[in-house]
Image (cartoon, coloured by chain):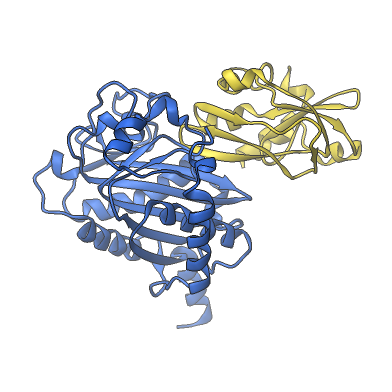
Amino acid sequence: MSPNQESKITAEYPLWDILDTGIQKASFNMALDDILLERSLQGLLRTPLFRFYGWERPSISLGRYQLIHKDIHLANCFQDNIPLVRRPTGGRAVFHDDELTYSVIIPSGHNWTRHSLMESYAMISKILVKGMKSIGLDVDFEKHDHGLKIYPHQASCFASTTPYEVTLKGYKIIGSAQYRHGGAILQQGSILISVKKGISAYFNTNEFLQKGIKDIVNIDVNSESLKQKIKEALSMGYIKPLPLFKLPDDISDSAHELALNKYETERWTFSR
Amino acid sequence: MNPDDLKFSKSHEWVKLEGNVAIIGISDYAQHELNDIVFVELPEIGKQISAGGEFGVLESVKTASDLYSPVSGEVLEVNSELENSPDLVNKEPYGKGWIVKLQLSNPSELDSLLNHTDYQNLLKG
């Protein structure tokens, strides 16, 4: 391959790192995204990064500035031992259980940071949609929602919709939120596989209807199989993944430290 | 405020000069882009801010996004109405949705900002 051919392919299929950190504690999950964003600002990430992760137990993440006492039913959370963690990203609360969670870190200066908020949402959503369609899910993804109302003051992320949401038979199945910091972008999101009944008990809100993929269509899917399909979509379409990124020990150590000193503290979790 | 009387930064903040005081907010394009703003993190009075430096965070339903000051100066006043009504930034980005007032420390920084026409051209790409 000539250098010209190689540079053309790189331009059309920008190189990205893929990181799979498996099942982790809520605080570590947030701390690692935070550390990766900071590393990207220091120029220490090779490329944009697509991370997949899971939760060691059902947990609730809150938006960066969400009012915890107003939106979360703390007594029910404590009674059922549901960990609460405040995200670095905006948006509303998410109950994490049977889902595939992702984050995307785009370093400052990368082409994608020049796109508007909604455009960058759209580009990331297109990758997820491609993976979901490849397993036969007839997901909708359009600029305008399907008559669903926008409820900015809802406690739960999945009780509100905004443009460029991914829906399945009218139900929002991917909830995402961003933090734009220092010219870089961190986007975190959850793809719901199934939703247990009764989770609205953890929110101070009216009963809301939230469903995952398996609650809506009869399909054999789990977070692992969906993750593989999205990884394939990454390589087929918009992104040329680099060999699987191994999390360096120093980043992992920093994330454990930040989990302890920030994301597990009442000072951060109850800051609003 | 008439946007034709304002100066704009490429990161979508605006400045209006009143004497040696710079009033700062975000552009109509930026508020539209962010969608419904639900919280504004404001700086402390007396804080020194550098041109291009962060002075707060806007949170909308979809994102938390840093605010960058177009000019340097000391924070004289913040728009405390935004604590209870952050949606003023959406409703009146060039009026009641202003965010902060700075005692300007380097007026020449205004020269590098865009007028409204140039800012609109920037948005058109």
Q: Foreground: B97 or A207? A: A207
Count of numbered badges drawn on the protein: 0
Q: Is residue A112 left or right of residue A135?
A: right
Where residue A86 appears, as percent x and y from the top left, is: 46, 42
Residue extending furthest toward the bottom: A1
Q: Colour of chain B?
A: yellow
Q: Foreground: B110 or A222? A: A222
Q: Quadrant of the C terminus of chain B?
A: top right
Where residue A128 appears, as percent x and y from the top left, is: 32, 51
Residue B106's image quarter? Answer: top right
Where residue A205 appears, as percent x and y from the top left, is: 32, 23
Q: Is residue B70 left or right of residue A83?
A: right
Residue depicted at 47% across the width and 67% down the height: A252
Q: Which chain is blue?
A: A
Where residue A150 appears, as percent x and y from the top left, is: 38, 24
In the displayed structure, B74 sits above or below A32; it is above
Q: Quadrant of the N terminus of chain B?
A: top right
Residue depicted at 24% across the width and 51% down the height: A132
Residue extending furthest toward the left: A218
Residue depicted at 54% across the width and 56% down the height: A37
Q: Is residue B39 left or right of residue A62?
A: right
